[in-house]
Amino acid sequence: MNDRKLILPSEIKVCATCTYWDGERTVDPEMRLVVVDECCLGECLVSESSMGALAKGKPDCDCLWDDIDDTEHQTEADKAGSAPTGLAARGEDS
């Protein structure tokens, strides 16, 4: 199974770039990019439902999309280099 990898700028508002999505992805905070398999599924921690990496917030739900690179919301541990929950730091295996 060779799924295509997608490289997304982190400011695009899709599930793969949201803090509240726990699907498998790799984040490069310096380049502000997210790498994800094209068909990857994960769970939205807000709606508690399965969402595809490229899904956009639904207008009829309370989507709380939050930029994964938003340093205002990072803890001191995150700023020191550990990845937020659900994210693999660059170079780590999932």
Image (spheres, rainbow, N blue to C red):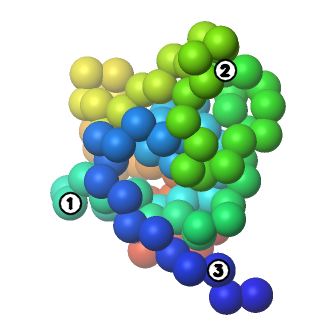
As shown in the figure, which amino acid type bears the numbered disc 3?
Answer: Asp
> Which circle marks residue 46 in the picture?
2
Q: Which residue is identified by label 3?
A: 3
Residue 87 at x, y percent in the picture: 53, 51
Residue at x-position 59% and y-position 43%: 55
Label 1 vs label 3, nearer the camera: 3
Circles 3 and 2 in contact, beta carbons < 8 Å:
no
Q: CA distance from mark 3 to mark 2?
A: 27 Å
Q: Which residue is identified by label 1?
A: 31
Q: Secondary structure at mark 1?
A: loop
Residue 92 at x, y percent in the picture: 50, 71
As shown in the figure, which amino acid type bears the numbered disc 1?
Answer: Met
As shown in the figure, which amino acid type bears the numbered disc 2?
Answer: Val
Q: Residue furthest left?
A: 30
Relative to 86, say whether 91 is above or below: below
Q: Pick whichever, 10 or 22, lies toward us.
A: 10
Q: Pick whichever, 13 or 88, lies toward us.
A: 13
Residue 67, quarter of the rendered image? top left
Residue 58 at x, y percent in the picture: 61, 24
Residue at x-position 34% and y-position 22%: 73
Q: Residue furthest front?
A: 59
